[in-house]
Image (tube, rainbow, N blue to C red):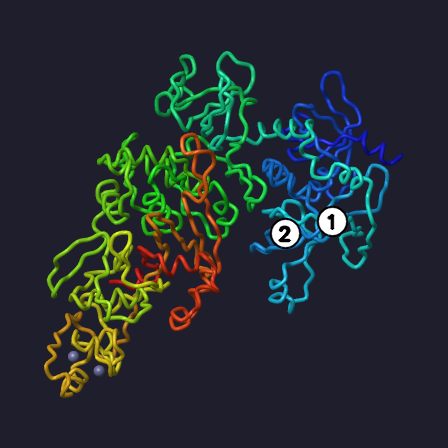
């Protein structure tokens, strides 16, 4: 009886602000529909109580199941309900959760993996007209529990919108969720009942609720509302082909009655324009790339839809982007947004045709680093120039939408001046020099003194050492010091960005099987004319001795610099009388007991290579565990001719944990017990990228 009644209830969510004052996100139970297309019924307020009766145009709403309505009702503010619904895959997965499914929730600004325990019904017990809100009772994953158990604060009930990721379960024994009742949000009063009529209904259609044709059609209809300028979409062109592109304009074109979308397609098509429809220009793009179609022909880019057996990363709708904003510079992705914005399949820069050297380099340089934030010289930047393409189509796009299609990268490659950059695998250092010098017109990052004379400019530093000069598992700190000191090189000043090339040559030979990528690089002792401490007594150093470098009695490998007293004493030893220490250039007017300011640079990316394939690790924030791994060709859909690469960004906090250990622990770690990514970072590093921190630049004169 009750079941029948519920089946007749129809629920809707308001997706467009109505004239009669119902705000977007309001939930309505329709009791009647007029011939003019008005829905009349009960509008639900917070707490699930029926607030008032109201009416709304049906075409301003989107239909919901009762279960969906209950889940959404617990989401506040109401605008977040629509955000969740835009994310079609995530929302359908949340509606279909079963016991012990693994989810990730945002909790106290942190992302927390949890297991689903129960549905919680919140609000007064059934009263006519009342729609109970549904929330989730979640358990922290084991292990996480241990860390937090001291606090003994129970987790709150989570709304559907708190869940940012659903990891599909592979077990065949999925238990449907039971619903517990919470009276007035008081956890003590929770009692459990075995099942609800809605659940019976849901179970009967378990796993197929969203393949129901009506529902999937309306989900598709829903997506029209959620598409916005800046979104990636697929569309059925007027000749019936599926095409992909970015929505550059939405509106009612001259002479039409309904909403159309103007897309900038990934590929050229002969029937397309450069942004005009008829005689009117709606936006500007390259010729033969602008397609105008009714908005109802568009839907979110299905290449991003998850397929089973993959860790799911539903497409997060990018924040609202106005057309004029497309030209604004976008800052690096903030640390707290990386998990939702970047991590997942079809994220990062899409690889194509030997492009991994370029994808990995661009990703390393621009995803999180602030080192190049002011490098785009806007005035020298013509509309179709290469730096404009780099800034607008690659860097801004990566930071804004988290994905750069292969076509944008190819457009950029073709303009690099030499044909081979568009077709062949190149060395990243060659590309970086070309990029910084000829595309961005940046002064060389490194000014180098050789034997005290200012001699070389460079964009990267190639480590050159003898194998016996350092230990078997050297750190980048040791390698850099040894490389500079043994050739008597110094940096003239603190670089804004220091790109260090590991001692490996070609694709096959590497000098060290493992290298520790120092997370902080102290460059105090390799700066010219910067105060340094005596190696022995800590006073201001005035001499440096190369021959002392490998002395086994003196901590071999460490740079040896001395005050004049210690310099005399050390070199009175018979084994060192042949040494020729040379005098350091020291800044004038420094008191002898002045404390020495250390200059640290921070690791922000590591480029790795294995069997000719480049990948990248990026440190995306100050937290030691904020590491992601990027592979532009992690997977492939389709065959060689018709397929495309699937770029993937993975979160790898274990890399941060590993690097937090002492160098001793790292060098002796059993890599067979470590994660695959830790092993790759330690064994495959090709380039380590460091940036100056605010702290250092502040103190630099
Ligand atoms: Zn001394
Ligand atoms: Zn010496």
Disc 2 secondary structure class? strand
Query: From what the image shows, is residue 542 above or below residue 445?
Result: below
Residue at the (37%, 41%) spot, across then down = 395
Residue 612 relative to residue 175: left or right? left
Residue 682: percent from left, percent from top: 38, 61
Q: Residues within 10 Å of mark 1 (few under 14, many from 20)?
A: few
* Quadrant in the picture for residue 601: bottom left
Residue at the (69%, 61%) spot, across then down = 154
- Image mark count: 2
Question: Which mark, residue 175?
Answer: 1
Residue nearest the viewer, comparing 482 with 497: 482
Query: From what the image shows, is residue 68 above or below residue 334?
Result: above
Question: Which mark, residue 323?
Answer: none
Disc 1 secondary structure class? loop
Residue nearest the viewer, comparing 224 with 531: 224
Q: Which residue is mark 2?
A: 102
Q: Quadrant of the C terminus?
A: bottom left
* Quadrant in the picture for residue 589: bottom left
Residue 584 relative to residue 264: left or right? left
Residue nearest the viewer, comparing 37 with 227: 227
Q: CA distance from mark 1 to mark 2?
A: 13 Å
Q: Residues within 10 Å of mark 2 (few under 14, many from 20)?
A: many
* Quadrant in the picture for residue 690: bottom left
Q: Quadrant of the N terminus?
A: top right
Residue 315: percent from left, percent from top: 54, 39
Which of the marked residues, 1 or 2, is nearer the chain's N terminus? 2
Residue 663: percent from left, percent from top: 38, 70
Query: From what the image shows, is residue 359 above or below residue 505?
Result: above
Whereabouts is ligand 1, in terms of quadrant? bottom left
């Amino acid at each position: 009886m009750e079941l029948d009644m519920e089946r007749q209830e129809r629920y809707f969510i308001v997706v467009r602000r109505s004239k009669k004052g119902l705000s977007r996100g309001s939930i309505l139970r329709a009791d009647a529909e007029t011939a003019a297309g008005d829905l009349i019924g009960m509008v639900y307020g917070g707490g699930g109580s029926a607030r008032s009766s109201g009416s709304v145009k049906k075409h301003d709403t989107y239909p919901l199941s009762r279960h969906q309505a209950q889940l959404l009702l617990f989401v506040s503010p109401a605008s977040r309900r629509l955000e969740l619904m835009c994310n079609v895959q995530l929302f359908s997965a949340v509606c279909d959760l079963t016991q012990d499914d693994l989810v990730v929730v945002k909790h106290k600004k942190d992302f927390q993996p949890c297991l689903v325990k129960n549905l919680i019904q919140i609000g007064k017990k059934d009263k006519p007209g009342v729609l109970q809100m549904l929330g989730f009772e979640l358990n922290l994953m084991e292990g996480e529990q241990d860390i937090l158990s001291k606090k003994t604060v129970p987790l709150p009930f989570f709304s559907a919108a708190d869940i940012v990721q659903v990891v599909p379960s592979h077990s065949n024994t999925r238990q449907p969720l039971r619903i517990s009742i919470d009276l007035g949000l008081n956890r003590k009063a929770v009692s459990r009942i075995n099942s609800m009529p809605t659940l019976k209904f849901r179970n009967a259609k378990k796993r197929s609720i969203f393949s129901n044709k009506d529902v999937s059609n309306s989900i598709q209809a829903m997506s029209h509302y959620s598409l916005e300028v800046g979104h990636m979409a697929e569309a059925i062109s007027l000749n019936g082909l599926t095409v992909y592109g970015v929505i550059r304009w939405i509106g009612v074109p001259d002479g039409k009655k309904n909403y159309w979308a103007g897309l900038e397609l990934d590929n050229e098509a002969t029937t397309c324009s450069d942004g005009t429809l008829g005689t009117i220009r709606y936006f500007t793009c390259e010729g033969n790339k602008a397609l105008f179609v009714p908005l109802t022909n568009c839907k979110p880019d299905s290449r991003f839809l998850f397929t089973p057996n993959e860790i799911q990363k539903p497409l997060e709708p990018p924040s609202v982007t106005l057309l004029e904003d497309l030209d604004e510079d976008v800052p690096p992705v903030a640390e707290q947004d990386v998990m939702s914005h970047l991590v997942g399949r079809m994220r990062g820069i899409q690889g194509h045709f030997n492009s991994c050297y370029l994808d990995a380099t661009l990703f390393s340089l621009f995803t999180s680093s602030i080192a190049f934030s002011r490098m785009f010289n806007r005035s020298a930047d013509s509309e179709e120039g290469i730096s404009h393409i780099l800034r607008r189509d690659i860097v801004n796009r990566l930071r804004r939408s988290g994905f750069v299609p292969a076509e944008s990268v190819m457009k950029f490659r073709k303009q690099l001046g030499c044909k081979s950059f568009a077709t062949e695998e190149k060395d990243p250092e060659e590309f970086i020099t070309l990029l910084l010098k000829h595309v961005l017109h940046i002064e060389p990052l490194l000014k180098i003194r050789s034997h005290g004379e200012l001699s070389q400019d460079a964009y990267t530093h190639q480590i050159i050492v003898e194998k016996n000069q350092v230990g078997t598992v050297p750190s980048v700190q040791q390698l850099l010091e040894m490389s500079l000191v043994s050739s008597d090189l110094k940096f003239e000043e603190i670089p804004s960005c220091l790109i260090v090339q590991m001692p490996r040559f070609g694709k096959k030979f590497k000098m060290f099987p493992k290298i520790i990528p120092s997370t902080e690089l102290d460059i105090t002792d390799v700066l010219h004319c910067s105060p340094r401490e005596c190696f022995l007594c800590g006073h201001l150093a005035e001499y440096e001795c190369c021959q002392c470098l490998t002395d086994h009695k003196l901590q071999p490998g460490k740079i040896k610099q001395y005050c004049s007293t210690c310099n005399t004493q050390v070199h009175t030893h018979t084994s060192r009388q042949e040494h020729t220490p040379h005098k350091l250039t020291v800044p004038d007017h420094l008191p002898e007991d002045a404390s020495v300011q250390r200059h640290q640079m921070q690791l922000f990316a590591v480029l790795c290579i294995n069997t000719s394939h480049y990948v990248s690790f990026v440190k995306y924030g100050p937290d030691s565990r904020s590491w992601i791994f990027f592979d532009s060709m992690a997977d492939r859909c389709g065959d060689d001719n018709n397929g495309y690469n699937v770029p993937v960004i993975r979160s790898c906090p274990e890399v941060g944990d590993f690097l937090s250990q002492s160098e001793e622990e790292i060098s002796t770690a059993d890599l067979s017990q470590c994660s695959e990514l830790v092993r790759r970072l330690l064994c495959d590093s090709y380039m380590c990228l460091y940036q100056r921190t605010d702290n250092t630049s502040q103190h630099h004169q």
